[in-house]
Image (tube, grey):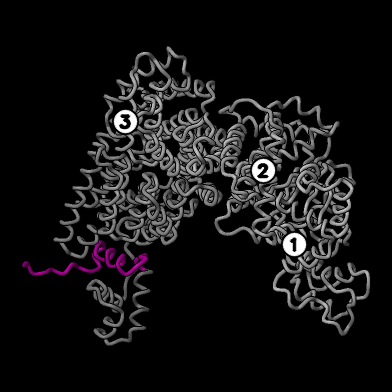
């Protein structure tokens, strides 16, 4: 960092000590990162400069990258391009670049060179940069400084995430040299509004063990006063110091500027700080007005260029003689308004200075200078960075034709370096400009249909599926009757694929059918093969299996003839889903592994991700949960390294990972992963954290779980989100003992999850039916115990309907295949709950359920064991009941499943199972008064009503009720009554027939 400061370093000694401590650890081989936060002007740059100077003095190499604010223009990887450029120019470091050719592409595109877009280039680029930095750290202790992350483009944020979470901060493999690296990154805390894109990244990074956050808070008043006195060359009155301290509010930059704006005759009697100033901008402008007119002109021109500007570009823009320009620059540098850099650049010492100067420009002056910079950058024509900057300047100067051309160049650069969010932004800008630019000024090599299709692809890669659909529909609307048939087909199958991702399945099938009808299968063509591959997926989604299989086999044969490896892979994946040896079988997964290799060899990451997802879900469905996690890890690692964690299959894998962690009982890991993902996922991916809601529910956090579930339903319809919410809300109703709500919730869920065009219900209906049956069975038992035969019969009839729904769903299966271990386990539980609802707990039925859940779901196994213990106790097999109850309790305690533990404890107390008592042992004897109170409880009396009938106070009645609950081992009045009926402590009251 080449900046120099003429001001003393005051008030940040503790923060600097923390940073130098990190540097010492990094130099010793313990790589670390620090995120430096603070408001504008609080001293972030100064503190980093001091830390960098310390690093350099101890032999570390310091490389700095800056993020810039250019409005809507994205400059992919800008700070890293700057860092890598500086490293490549260092003779000591340049040799390391030869081992990482992928990095040359980023440096090359920054200077106008580079090849064609590479689908796997983003992954190679990330890995290449991580490897290069590791090699550089082997050559020399290294400090990377990134300034102003609040202005970072999305691709830079993705790369930083990769480097800190998976790259340079990871300790080297066993036996490797220690990695001598530190990363310091600053950002404006006051700029981070709630939806700022940096917020989720910060939330993720600060959870990493090697990343610390250091916040620069406002300086203490005493430190501000020391700073003011140290800066003032002449005497300054105490009153003036107090006024500056009051107005600066702990901000060092404000204090410096207020001091610099003082008149030269400050005395104890003078007013000191200008009192009529409305804002800091006024103070800054007063300082600038003290410059010569030429220096002011240079500063105004530099402000239009941005926070930093190259000397040559500034010289051409101001059009001053060299000596006059140097004099003006020397004046601005001497006043600490501009800072010179080693790379022939000048930077505003503070962004606030630049913002104040820019805001003070006249509208016409601003337009003229933007136009001037656009023309100069066009003349340079040497870098992709210039294209993005030129697009910005052209738009601000209202030269829309040039803005269009520059936006397209910038989009090409973003695509080349794997920055889909920036590519999308540039393409959307180009599409906006296309409509207002004269036809003869538009580039002949482009048209709006292909541009819109390209934008939809960028949106899909950036994790915006709904935006991708909107853009593809726009492309369809732009495609007139004279559109080439292949392009027309491509638009339609692209739209179909995007519609599948947002669960608009009927429309997807319609468009895929139209695409296939537009072009013939012969002669063989790339377009027909991919139209067919998309149609196969769409046809399967709407239950057209025969159509899907016929087209898939025909398309696979053509893809093999054309040697389209990725299309072959996609079609193999689809066919595996339609064959007897499906993804649940070893043979099916062998074919999926082959598909994965074909896709990887072809460089088609989305198809490879589809293969990895099917491998993972196939293992899950067959009960191989540990193997499932292995495939999930492979898939997420591929997506993470490629910056595609928000892509459709990556989101599915994140959900599956959470689900497996939940199923295996690794609940803390599941909850932790959800917390980390919460601020990272796009709104369309909220379902991925769904299993954490299952954890919250099972641990007794009903309000939090149901609130989270309803939030999933408040968004645009998403099938997976609806599935997660349905499970949570149905189980929550059952846990509350609300059978009617459970039935209503399940009915609504089945309707929402079953598309009208699909003949088979989804497999999750079996689980929903079992959960609902639990609530209905509870209600049936309570009705029988209270003597309400009518209600008990009604519950039994409802249970019969639910059980038939579970059986029929399990028999057919949503994809026509037999149920896997999980589906069979839920069916066994539904059967056991159905028997409980009809006649009471049955030992054999619950024993079958326990056995079924033994495939690897400890929580559901424990829930079934609790019911088996009840059935065994009813059958007077107390020793076996105690064994099952204790096993269920151990699991509940280990998982933190409070409601289950409490239910088991109540069963153990009322059944006297703790010490496996002999048959005939009874519940602790009730006193005569307690028996009277229990009889009235059975009639539904309140404490006050009990007191009135027994001529005791309501408070005394409450004490008796508490004693009764303790003796019966009941958690509530309702449960106490149910136990009393079951144990014969009170008799059901007969009611006259009507």
Q: Is residue 145 visible?
A: yes
Residue at the spot 38% in from the left edge and 33% down from the top edge: 479
The reply to whether discs 2 and 1 touch (Cβ–Cβ < 8 Å) is no
Spot occupied by residue 8 in the image (x, y as percentages of width and height): 88, 62
Kind of element beneath mark 1: loop
Kind of element beneath mark 3: helix
Which residue is the site of mark 3?
540
Residue at the spot 54% in from the left edge and 52% down from the top edge: 679
* Disc number lying in front (1 or 3): 1
Label drawn at residue 784: none
Which residue is the site of mark 2?
374
For residue 745, above or below residue 42: above
Which residue is the site of mark 1?
41
Q: Which residues are magenta?
A: 967-994
Q: Decide which of tag 2 and tag 1 comes sooner along the chain.
A: 1
Instruction: Give how far apart the Cα atoms at labels 2 and 1 are.
Output: 30 Å
The reply to whether discs 2 and 3 touch (Cβ–Cβ < 8 Å) is no
* Disc number lying in front (2 or 3): 2
């Amino acid at each position: 960092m080449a900046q120099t400061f003429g001001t003393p370093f005051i008030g940040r000694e503790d923060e600097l000590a923390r940073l130098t401590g990190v540097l010492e650890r990094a130099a010793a081989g313990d790589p670390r990162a620090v995120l430096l936060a603070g408001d504008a002007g609080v001293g972030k740059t100064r503190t980093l400069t001091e830390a960098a100077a310390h690093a350099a003095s101890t032999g570390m190499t310091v490389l700095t990258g800056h993020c810039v604010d250019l409005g809507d223009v994205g400059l992919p990887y800008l700070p890293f391009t700057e860092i890598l450029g500086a490293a490549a120019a260092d003779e000591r470091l340049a040799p390391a670049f030869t081992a990482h050719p992928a990095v040359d592409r980023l440096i090359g595109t920054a200077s106008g060179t580079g090849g064609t877009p590479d689908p796997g280039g983003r992954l190679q680029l990330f890995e290449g940069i991580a490897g290069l930095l590791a090699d550089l750290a082997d050559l020399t202790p290294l400090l990377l400084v990134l300034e102003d992350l609040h202005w970072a483009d999305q691709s830079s944020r993705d790369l930083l995430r990769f480097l800190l979470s998976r790259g340079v901060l990871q300790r080297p493999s066993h036996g490797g040299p220690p990695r001598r690296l530190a990363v310091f990154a600053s950002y404006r805390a006051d700029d981070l509004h709630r939806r700022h894109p940096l917020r989720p990244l910060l939330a993720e990074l600060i959870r990493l063990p090697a990343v610390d956050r250091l916040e620069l808070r406002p300086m203490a008043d005493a430190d501000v006063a020391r700073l003011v006195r140290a800066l003032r060359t002449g005497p300054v009155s105490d009153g003036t110091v107090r006024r500056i301290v009051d107005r600066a509010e702990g901000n060092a930059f404000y204090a410096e500027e207020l001091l610099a704006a003082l008149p030269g005759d400050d005395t104890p009697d003078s007013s000191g700080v200008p009192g009529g100033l409305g804002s800091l901008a006024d103070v800054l402008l007063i300082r600038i007005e003290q410059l010569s007119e030429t220096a002011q002109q240079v500063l105004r021109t530099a402000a239009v260029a941005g926070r930093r500007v190259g000397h040559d570009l500034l010289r051409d823009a101001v059009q001053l003689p060299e000596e006059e320009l140097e004099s003006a620059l020397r004046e601005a540098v001497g006043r600490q308004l501009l800072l010179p850099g080693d790379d022939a650049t000048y930077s505003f010492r503070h962004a606030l200075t630049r913002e104040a100067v820019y805001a003070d420009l006249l509208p016409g002056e601003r337009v003229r200078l933007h136009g001037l910079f656009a023309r100069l950058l066009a003349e340079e024509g040497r870098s992709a960075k210039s294209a993005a900057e030129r697009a910005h300047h052209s738009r601000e100067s209202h030269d829309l034709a040039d803005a269009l051309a520059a936006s397209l160049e910038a989009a090409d650069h973003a695509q080349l370096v794997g920055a889909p969010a920036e590519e999308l932004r540039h393409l959307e800008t180009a599409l906006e400009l296309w409509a207002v630019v004269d036809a003869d000024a538009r580039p002949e090599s482009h048209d709006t249909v292909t541009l819109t299709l390209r934008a939809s692809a960028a949106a899909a890669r950036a994790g915006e599926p709904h935006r991708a659909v909107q853009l593809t529909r726009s492309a369809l609307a732009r495609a007139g009757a004279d559109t080439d048939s292949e392009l027309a087909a491509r638009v339609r199958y692209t739209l179909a694929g995007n519609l599948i991702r947002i669960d608009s399945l009927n429309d997807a099938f319609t468009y895929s059918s139209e695409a296939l009808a537009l072009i013939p299968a012969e002669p063989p063509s790339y377009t027909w093969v991919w139209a067919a591959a998309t149609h196969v997926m769409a046809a399967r989604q709407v239950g057209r299996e025969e159509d899907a299989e016929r087209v898939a086999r025909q398309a696979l044969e053509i893809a093999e003839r054309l040697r389209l490896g990725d299309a072959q892979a996609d079609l193999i994946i689809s066919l595996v889903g339609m064959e007897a040896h499906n993804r649940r079988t070893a043979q099916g997964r062998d074919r999926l592994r082959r598909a994965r290799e074909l896709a990887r060899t072809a460089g088609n990451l989305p198809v490879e991700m589809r293969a990895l997802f099917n491998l993972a879900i196939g293992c899950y469905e067959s009960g191989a949960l540990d193997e499932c996690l292995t495939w999930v890890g492979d898939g997420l690692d591929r997506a993470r390294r490629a910056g595609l964690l928000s892509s459709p299959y990556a989101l599915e894998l994140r959900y599956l990972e959470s689900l497996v962690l939940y199923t295996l009982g690794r609940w803390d890991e599941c909850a932790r992963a959800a917390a980390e993902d919460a601020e990272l996922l796009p709104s369309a991916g909220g379902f991925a954290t769904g299993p954490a809601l299952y954890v919250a529910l099972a641990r007794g956090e009903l309000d939090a779980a149901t609130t989270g579930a309803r939030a999933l339903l408040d968004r645009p319809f998403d099938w997976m989100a609806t599935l997660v919410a349905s499970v949570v809300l149905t189980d929550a109703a059952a846990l509350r003992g609300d059978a009617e709500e459970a039935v209503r919730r399940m009915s609504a869920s089945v309707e929402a999850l079953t598309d009208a065009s699909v003949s088979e219900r989804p497999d999750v209906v079996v689980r929903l039916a079992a959960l609902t049956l639990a609530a209905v069975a509870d209600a049936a038992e309570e009705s029988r115990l209270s003597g309400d035969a009518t209600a008990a019969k009604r519950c039994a009839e409802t249970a019969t309907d639910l059980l038939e729904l579970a059986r029929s769903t399990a028999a057919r299966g949503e994809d026509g295949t037999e149920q896997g271990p999980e589906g069979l386990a839920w069916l066994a539980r539904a059967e056991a709950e159905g028997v409980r609802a009809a006649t009471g707990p049955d030992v054999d039925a619950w024993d079958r359920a326990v056995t079924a859940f033994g495939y690897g779901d400890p929580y559901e196994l424990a829930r079934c064991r609790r019911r088996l213990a009840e059935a065994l106790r009813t059958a007077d097999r107390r020793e076996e009941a105690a064994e099952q109850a204790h096993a269920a309790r151990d699991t509940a305690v280990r998982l933190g499943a409070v409601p289950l533990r409490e239910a088991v404890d109540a069963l153990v107390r009322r059944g006297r199972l703790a010490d496996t008592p002999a048959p005939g042992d009874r519940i602790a004897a009730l006193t005569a008064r307690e028996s009277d109170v229990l009889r009235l409880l059975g009639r539904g009396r309140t404490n006050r009503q009990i007191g009135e009938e027994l001529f005791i106070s309501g408070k005394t009645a409450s004490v008796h009720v508490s004693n009764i609950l303790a003796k019966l081992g009941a958690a509530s009045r309702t449960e106490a009554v149910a136990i009393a009926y079951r144990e014969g402590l009170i008799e059901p009251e007969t009611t006259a027939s009507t």
